[in-house]
Image (cartoon, rainbow, N blue to C red):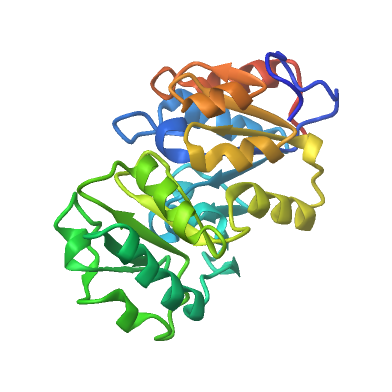
Amino acid sequence: MTGAGSAVNPHHQPLRLLATDLDGTLLSTAGTVSKRSRRALASVQAAGGVVVLITGRPSRMVLGVAEELGLIGHVICSNGAATHRLSDGAAEERLSLAPEILRRVIPLLRAAVPGIGLALEWGDAMAAEQSYRRLPESDGAADVPDILGVIGAGHPVLKVMARSARHAPPDLARLINACCGAEVHASTSGAPFAEIAAQGVDKGAALERLCLRLGVTQGQVIAFGDAPNDLPLLAWAGYGVAVANADQALLELADEVAPSNDADGVAVVVERLLDVGRFGP
């Protein structure tokens, strides 16, 4: 990050990588990518830049979007817990929650938040307790009576989703971090649940590792986001952009505030930078 309010990346070096969140950022409220945004991303790739979707969504909900947009390279899923190649969809990196940590943390969560509903995300599938499914729609999750019973059954748990009828997701995340923050970290993405990951797993750390493999420096990265789970992403990127509908913490952190997701904020900034030749290999 380089300080709020700058109009362009101050390092005067080519931007080589664009990282963008999906929901609430690149996607409209209706869940679509506009023609303008599609053209902007395609133009970045045509100029030799790299486009990386970086999202809380699991791989099964990201790989198809990347293919539809004509992206090449990689996507980062599950809030940084998994990085997939787009050439074949294979996972290059998975940072799962250790079974022994989950077995310690889940009873603590249930004691701290009576009636909490929990679900496990594996990337290609998920499983949810009935207490989770009784709350808003649960993405076709398989029913399990107790998620403790499927931990360590061969599937790496990339994140845990938590829902509560008594607590909004931001409040629920704070409660989780208060009782279990020594072992896991909870954040929110605008979805109707809190998202729990292993300590040290976040979008910024995942992008840093990917950039190291690609030979891209921090100052050559521009990132876009809207929700609290995007804070590490914007904090690490050389130039961080929040869309106008973003959480207040992102608006305060960002180097620039773009128009909202419904006003093609990502495309507005990208077009300006393309016009002055800032993207390149």
Name which residue lies at 33% across and 36% down: 31
Residue 56, above or below 44: below
Q: Is residue 39 visible?
A: yes
Q: Residue furthest left?
A: 134
Quadrant of the image for the N terminus? top right
Name which residue lies at 73% across and 17% down: 8
Image coords of residue 53 (percent x, y): 54, 45
Image coords of residue 264 (percent x, y): 46, 21
Q: Is residue 281 visible?
A: no
Image coords of residue 125 (percent x, y): 34, 68
Name which residue lies at 22% across and 68% down: 129
Q: Residue furthest right?
A: 12
Quadrant of the image for the C terminus? top right
Quarter residue 121 falls in: bottom left
Residue 171, above or below 76: above
Name which residue lies at 67% across and 52% down: 205
Foreground pick, 178 / 16: 178
Question: What number of labels is visible?
Answer: 0
Residue 186, above or below 90: above
Foreground pick, 277 / 106: 106
Residue 213, above or below 216: below
Foreground pick, 49 / 169: 169
